[in-house]
Image (tube, rainbow, N blue to C red):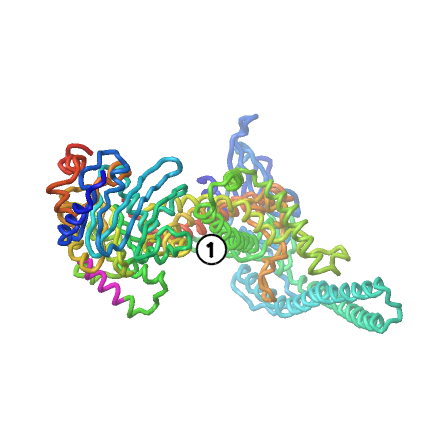
Amino acid sequence: MAVVLYNGLGVYWADPLELVELADGTKLLGEEVERERDPHSEVERVKYHVGNREFGSAFRWVELADVREISYPDDAMKLDRTENLNYIGYLEGIETPGLDVPEADTPQERLAAAMVAAWQKHDQEIVPIEDEAGEIGRELNREIKYAIIDAEYRKKQLLRGGAPADDPEVTQIDQELECLLALEKDLKDRSHQLTLKRGKLKAALDENVALFVDSAGRKSTIPLVDIVRFTLPNRMGFGAKVGHYAAKVWELLWDDPREANQDGGVFPAIMGTVLLVFLMAITCFPLGVLAGIYLGEYAKEAPLVRLVRIAVNNLAGIPSIVYGIFGLGFFIYLCGGTLDCWLYPELVEEGEMVFGQGCILWASLTLGLLTIPVVIVSTEEALKQIPRGVKEGSYALGATKFQTLCRVLVPMASPGMMTGFILAMARAAGEVAPLMLTGATKIAPVPTSGDFPYVHLDRQFMHLGFHIYDISCKSPNVEATKPLVYVTTLLLLAIVVTMTSLAIWLRSRMRKRYQTRAI
Amino acid sequence: MQQPTDEVAQSAQQAAEERITLKSPGEAVFGDTAGAASQIARIEDPIVKCRNVCLFYGESQALTDVTLDFPRHEVTALIGPSGCGKSTFLRCLNRMNDLIDGVRITGTMDLDGQEINDRGRDVIELRRRVGMVFQKPNPFPKSIYENIAYGLRIAGVRQKAVLDEAVESSLKRAALWGEVKDRLHESALGLSGGQHQRLCIARAIAVSPDIILMDEPCSALDPRSTTRIEDLIGELREEYTIIIVTHNMQQAARVSDFTAFLYEGELIEYGPTKQMFTRPGRKETEDYITGRFG
């Protein structure tokens, strides 16, 4: 916990850039990452993050004995880029053939102004084209595609039903299809044109570049729009560092990931996690409470009930990956497949699936199944804890079993039920194994949108736990994502703690209202 | 053991003042079930008539041929050593024993002409007519107001005016109004033990029952609270029939009009309290009252 806190919180603090002159005369510019004594050679060495992945590894080990001199050049600059992660070097100048950049006192200020201008141009010229292309792409891939599939399916059904090829209905569908195909072609052409146009504009924009040189004297030309932000860590005061830290955290929380999850934010993963747990809660909590009430209050001690109770208690101990397998087999293949056959027969024929694949609905139901025993057991326990006298008091006033349950027992047991809910939520939020089989994925947009039905249960989703697994074990550049692993872990813990404390706060409010007096 | 008819007539005349007649007073030998069963206290216009009530918890028998009548608008005390079945018997009267699995009852219990243990009988209606106050005060974890209104609310009363009125009058009758009228909407759990019990009595009164069963209502209370409850019982007898189980002989003597002595599930003696405590008909009763056993 302390390790995660220490490493996670420190990631976004701007460290100074050291210019290290080595014994052999070479220089390197970078941030010190860690220091250790080599276990074999007993040599003290330092790891530097030197960035500039286009020239090789972004990290270098330097033996302490080789270091001749360390200085902190004032104008050393660190860039966050959309490609190849960080660049560390010195600004040489900028070239802005297509931009109107105001003059500024320092090259850094000029770079900032040029970046603003470049991004403005990008937003004005390229973004609308991208939006339109995206819109067309969606139309092509959704409406038109499904309309064509649907028409073809209807035609096939008619022909299979023995209708002749010149049946008026068939010809009508043929006409429909013709229209659709023509529309599809139009849209494809338009999309192609847009792609070309965008390419041209982007190429023109990419001519606006900044020129850099690194510590080894290698020159780089970086398009302005590829630079996300630049910093001069050696010049930054404390306030500037705090500002930089806040900006990075903001990016983490609200932005999409960049470069195969190696950089950028984790917003979709946060939303995916929260949505998943929320869906899990609204499905599993009512069911679990009802089952607990039935077992605790209504069920007679029959062998079958005892069997159910044993099963419920044992369910809590099953490894979560087994639930994943069950979710895959039962929910996705059986339920999802059947649902698809009923709702979208034309898609099934084409080998397409809607619910028959991993998605947030099945993932949340699988998680619900995993956590429901906890809710059932704690509901039953909470009901058992209620003094017999209170129950009898209610019956003695002429209350039915149901009235007693609703008005006295459930309110009194609610803090206990909440405890079960909290435990269930804490377990669900941290569970990854079952999700890998039921719908969590490496990169996916947030499964909500402005289009009906707003929450898309049939979509795959990102999940913080899965994200941690992905960036720590599946990333092409494990060294570079290490800090991100700490940050994401911290974030996941923070979310679990937040949701749990919310539930605990709710429970303490309930306790105050319905506390049982110790008699 | 049959007594001459003239003697029965004579004692009936005698008991006209006390409204009671005893058959074969004090002659049944202790442990002789036939004798105990034949000892019927005859009461005019009883509210509940019990005949040969036997109760079994699975295999074991808890009550054996209990036969007695409860007088209307009087306080009847059930006394006897622990485990003699007096609480069990009390709980038969509003069928609280239904909540326990494996309880079987034989014999008849007649409440105003209707059999209590009838299968088709509406238990809800019965419990509304026969309220109960328990040994441990058991207020609900709700406000004082909601505790009293509970019985009416579950009966379907919604009008606020009716509820307000009922809450006030029941709290007044339970002698609790003055203490709680300023904090009706605070949690009932904040009251003291004695107040809790009066609250439970008020809660029982609120649904206007005919009978109030009290199962050792003062055993968990201090002497002062006990006195208040006893005074309250004295006032309530004007309107309600009260049946009280107690371990405290003095209490039985103080608050009740009639006393029934149970031992090992059998009714040993039943009669006016004054008579029971001054000249008990049977030796066992005398021994128990004077503390020689039990």
Judge by depth and name the residue closer to the eye, A418 or B163.
B163
Quarter occupied by the C terminus of chain A: top left
The reply to whether residue B232 is visible in this rendering is yes
Judge by depth and name the residue closer to the eye, A490 or B139.
B139
State the residue position of label 1. A246
The reply to whether residue A18 is visible in this rendering is no
Relative to B49, A309 lies left or right: right
Q: Quadrant of residue A116?
A: bottom right
Judge by depth and name the residue closer to the eye, A199 or A157.
A157
Residue type (three-letter) at the residue carrying disc 1: Ala
Q: Is residue B169 magenta?
A: yes
Q: Is residue A249 magenta?
A: no
Residue at the (22%, 50%) spot, across then down: B42
* Magenta stretch in the rendered image: B164-175
Quarter occupied by the N terminus of chain A: top left
Measured as percent of width and height from the top left, residue A113 is found at 55, 65
**Chain of the residue where label 1 is placed in the rendered structure:** A
Q: Is residue A156 above or below residue A484?
A: below
Residue at the (54%, 45%) spot, across then down: A370
Q: Is residue A382 above or below residue A149?
A: above
Looking at the image, how many numbered discs can be counted on the residues? Answer: 1
Q: Quadrant of residue B161?
A: bottom left
Measured as percent of width and height from the top left, residue A313 is found at 50, 39
Relative to A406, A304 lies left or right: right
Measured as percent of width and height from the top left, residue A185 is found at 79, 68
Measured as percent of width and height from the top left, residue B262 is found at 24, 40
- The crowding category of the residue bearing disc 1, from other C-alpha atoms within 10 Å (few below 14, some 14 to 19, many at least 20), is some
- Report helix, strand or loop for mark 1: helix
Type of secondary structure dominating the magenta stretch: helix
